[in-house]
Image (tube, rainbow, N blue to C red):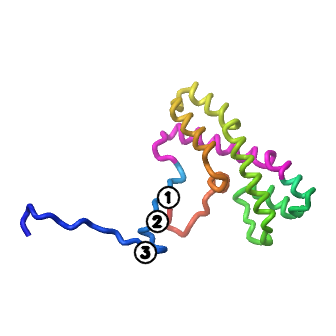
Amino acid sequence: MTVTATYPPHRRIAVFGSVAAERPHAPDRDDTLSPAARAVLERVIEAIASSAPAIASPILDRAVAEGAITRAERHLMLLELSDPSASLDAAPAVSQEARSTLREALAAIRRAAPGIARPILDEAVDAERLTPAQEQRILERLRSSPARVLRNTLRPPVPGPAGSP
């Protein structure tokens, strides 16, 4: 072939279940944030996590009163929300109603998250640790994140084997 010859386009073949066919996952943390902004975001996440049991309690209490979940399931959910790093491996499998109740509680936490974050973010903007655009981006992320993202945010990542990220 000559230098001016055209090459056939590269094609990626996607096989069901193939890693190549998957979309890249959104990063768990925003790498565009400065270290100061990342520290502010961590403060926001800590504040939301510390408020989570108080927000979820009325929802869980109502579910117990309606008979949708047991007191043991309520206790396990509050334990998980108050200390996400606690190992619940010995906990029995939860019912479908319990999962639904947990989703409802996480949705309530997500709705409350911007209100919890606002004072921390406003203070950071005033102290020039965040720009107003970064504040808006964080607030939008809190408003639009699905409950499972919030749940993963509240739960710190489990360390993997040595040498893994």
Nearest the viewer among 79 and 62 is: 62
Q: Of 138 and 104, which appears nearest the observer?
A: 104
Say whether disc 3 or disc 2 marks the residue closer to the N-terminus. Answer: 3
Q: Residue at x 81, y 64 (%)?
A: 97
Label 3 is placed on what type of residue?
Answer: Val
* Residue tagged 3: 15
> In this rendering, would 63 be left or right of 137?
right
Q: Give the residue type at disc 2.
A: Glu
Q: Position of residue 88 (x, y in %)?
A: 75, 66
- Badge 3 or badge 1: first in the primary sequence: 3
Q: Which residues are magenta?
A: 30-59
Comparing marks 3 and 1, which lies closer to the viewer?
3
Q: Is residue 39 left or right of residue 2?
A: right
User: Which residue type carries mark 1?
Assistant: His
Q: Residues within 10 Å of mark 1 (few under 14, many from 20)?
A: few
According to the picture, the residue beneath numbered tag 2 turns out to be 22
Q: Are marks 1 and 2 in contact (CB under 8 Å)?
A: yes
Local SS, label 1: loop
Image coordinates for residue 120, horizontal then vertical, percent: 65, 33
User: In this rendering, would 54 be left or right of 147?
Assistant: right
